[in-house]
Amino acid sequence: MASRHQLRRPGTALDDVRNALQAAGHSIRPRGPEAFMASCPLHTDRSPSLSVGWRENTRTGTGGAVLLHCFSCQSPADAIAAALGLRLTDLFDNPPATGQRSPRAAQPKAARRAPALGPLPARITAPRQHTDHQWRRARVYTYLTPTGTPVQQVIREECTCTGYPHKQFRQRYRDGRHWVYRKPHGFTPVLYRPNAIQAATKTDAWIWVTEGEKDADTLTTLGRLATTNAQGAANFPTELVDAFAGLHVAIVADRDLAGYQRAINLHQRLHASAAQVAILLPAPDVDKADVSDHVDAGLWNREDAFGGLTRIAPTDLHPLAAAAKARRAAQRFDIALCEARAHHTLRGMVPGSARNAARWLAEAAHQQRTVQHTHHQLQHHLNQHSSPTAHTAARAVEAVFQRLTNDYRQHRVRPAPHTTNDHSPVKESA
């Protein structure tokens, strides 16, 4: 940790995170001088899903902070850092002094949460696979100003080297005559396909807001006006809200937690100024289904105003998000319980196994409580907004909670630890 009189150079925290990832054997793919993708330490990646970037603290001029975001598990930055053996203060070049409030512009939101359980031990039930991905550029989506000037590009890269499709996205920006991978100071975000906004303004037609450029292009080929924003579901810039004032807006929610949360956020921000806001879901009721999946399944209906997509009430987004959150917590619970059992079988043979088993079991209990809390929130929502969707989600979350509770109780009845061949237990500290 830097002292009060000796400041660390800008980017030191990024080097520390990179070194921790490399030391743990995680694959890293550069995305520019101050950003890279890496495999997430909290789960097994088929391709790097952890975005790591450094942002300068322009308010104080004392370096910057590392931003961590896993596109797969969506875990908070404190959990990711803890899994690497790092503290929250390690994400800063120069952490603020005790009691001093750090600038919000440079501090990751998730990093403001205090860690509850400490770092998770390494997984032993799912060995990490190192894959030499052969990425190819599949598409470049160019963002233009309303006057047609290119200012940003999203580069879609794909790989099928493991037999499974992988994708990743890289961002670059126009800085003078050059494309750069670091966002220029003062950069103003724009919407994808600005001509769609202009046409919607003139014709009073519906403007569709999708989660990604591919879906916006899919709708455009079907004769709909569609747009989106860069940098994923959770990053809709405030500067773009006014562009939808007075328009009829159709928000398409992908069928996953990020998609529901994005739709909730967009509806809250647009309904006051837009003429009308509709929430749409793809007809395929499968995880991560989007507009392109709806079209590929042959479900597009040209005669319907919304192409056969399902229109839902905004209040139904919350129970859908709650059910998705419970499913995600259940997946993490299953992993944690599996790891706890595996470490438990090594007690008496591998030092530290008792401690590791206890930590994984605590993680399972944490995920169980997350589902329980989600169920309570959903019950409160039902009291105010009863609907078939909400009741179905509540039953699903309750079933998940009961299953996790039963699995956790059964695990508490554990067999006696193994001993060595000479029947002399290995003494270890828990």
Image (tube, helix red, strand yellow):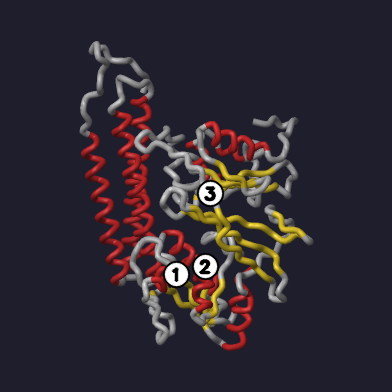
Task: Tell me the crowding category of disc 1: few under 14, some 14 to 19, or many 20 or more residues within 10 angstroms, Cα based.
Answer: some
Q: Which of marks 1 and 3 is nearer the N terminus?
A: 3
Q: Residue at x 44, y 41 (%)?
A: 42
* Nearer to me, 354 or 50: 50
Task: Tell me the crowding category of disc 3: few under 14, some 14 to 19, or many 20 or more residues within 10 angstroms, Cα based.
Answer: few
Q: Write down the quadrant of residue 9 in the picture.
A: top right
Name the residue that disc number 3 marks.
Answer: 134
Q: Where is residue 103 in the image (x, y as percent from the top left)?
A: 66, 48
Q: Quadrant of the N terminus?
A: top right
Name the residue that disc number 1 marks.
Answer: 292
The label shown at residue 214 is 2
* Nearer to me, 306 or 316: 306
- The vertical placement of 287 against 335, above or below, is below
- The vertical placement of 198 against 163, above or below, is below
Q: Do callouts 1 and 3 mark residues in contact (Cβ within 8 Å)?
A: no
Q: Position of residue 26 (x, y in %)?
A: 51, 38
Element assignment for label 1: helix
Q: Distance between the residues labelled 1 and 3?
A: 25 Å
